[in-house]
Every structure is written in C-alpha cells, then in structure tokens.
Amino acid sequence: MATLKELSDREHPEARRLVTDAVARAPGLRADADEAQHQVIEASWRERALNTEDALKAAHSEITNQRERMAELLGQIAELQQDWTDADIVRITTANVALRREVTALTNENERLTKRLMAARDNGRFADRRIAALEAHIAEHLTAPLADGR
C-alpha cells in the first residue's frame, strides 16, 4: 500500500515541486524582512544616539560656562568679605554722606534749571506771538491807506 506522500508525489509532481521551492525560499524571505526591520530600528537608534550626543555636548558646554561664572562671582564675594578697619568704615561712610549731599544738590539744581528753561520757552512763545501781532498790526496800517485810495 502506498503512503499518502507517495501518492501525492506521483499524482501532482509539479505542485509538490512548487511547495518544496516555496518552503526552501521562505526562511530567506523571512530573513530579508527581519533584516529590513532591523535596519529601520538601527537607524532610529542611531539618530537618537546622535541627538543625545549633541545634547550632551551642549550640556557640558553650559556646565563649563556656569562653573566659570560661579568662580568669578565667588572671587567677587571673597573680595567683598575682606576685613574692614574702623578707619575704612569711617572713610566710606563719610564719602557716602558727601555723595548723597552732592546728589541732593545736583537734583535741586536740575529742578531749578528745568524751571528756568520752561520760563524761557514761555517767554519765547510770548515774544513770538507779540511779534506776530505787531507785524500784523503794521501790515494792517500799511495796507489801510491803499484801501482808502490815498
């Protein structure tokens, strides 16, 4: 008695050959698809890695800048924390009082000069209006005899 495989081989040899070829190619096709998917994933990770490297470089640069700025500021604080003698404190306080008085005097002088400037501008405007009125009056007297026929 012939087995099922032997019967199918004898009855449909072309079909059997096609199935055998398809089975033989299937692992290669699957491997190609897996390779393409792997390449897409690899490209995505590569891009992420490059972006991460750029961000890391920027962060390191910013950290370096911040550290330099902190060092400068700490140096300024150290300079300000020097021990002051009583003479230094008296000298600085006296200079501060003198500077405040000078600021007050200059502010008052500025206000006084501003008021004088406003008054001078008002006088200038008044003089311009007065001159214009006088010119109009003179022009009126000069043209009046012509209008009378004299």
Image (spheres, rainbow, N blue to C red):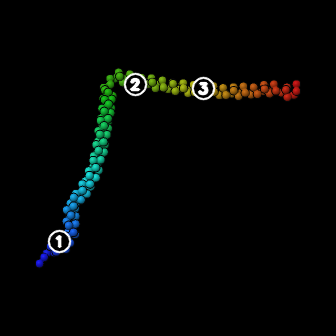
Percent position of residue 8, x then y: 18, 73
Q: Nearer the viewer, residue 118 or 19?
A: 19
Quarter of the image for residue 16 reads: bottom left
Q: Looking at this view, is 134 or 9 the one in front?
A: 9
Point 50% across, 26% down: residue: 104
> Mark 3 — residue?
117
Quadrant where the C terminus is found in the figure = top right
Amino acid, disc 1: Asp
Residue 85 seen: yes
Tell me the residue that label 1 is attached to.
9
Closest to the observer, 31 or 108 = 31
In the picture of the structure, the residue carrying the numbered disc 2 is 93
Mark 1 or mark 3: which is in front?
Answer: 1
Asked if 110 appears above or below 31 in the picture, the reply is: above
The residue that appears at 21% across and 64% down in the rendered structure is 21
Q: Quadrant of residue 30?
A: bottom left
Question: Mark 2 or mark 3, which is nearer the start of the sequence?
Answer: 2
Name the residue nearer the viewer: 112 or 128: 128
With 118 as the anchor, is 88 left or right in this view? left
Q: Disc 2 residue type?
A: Thr
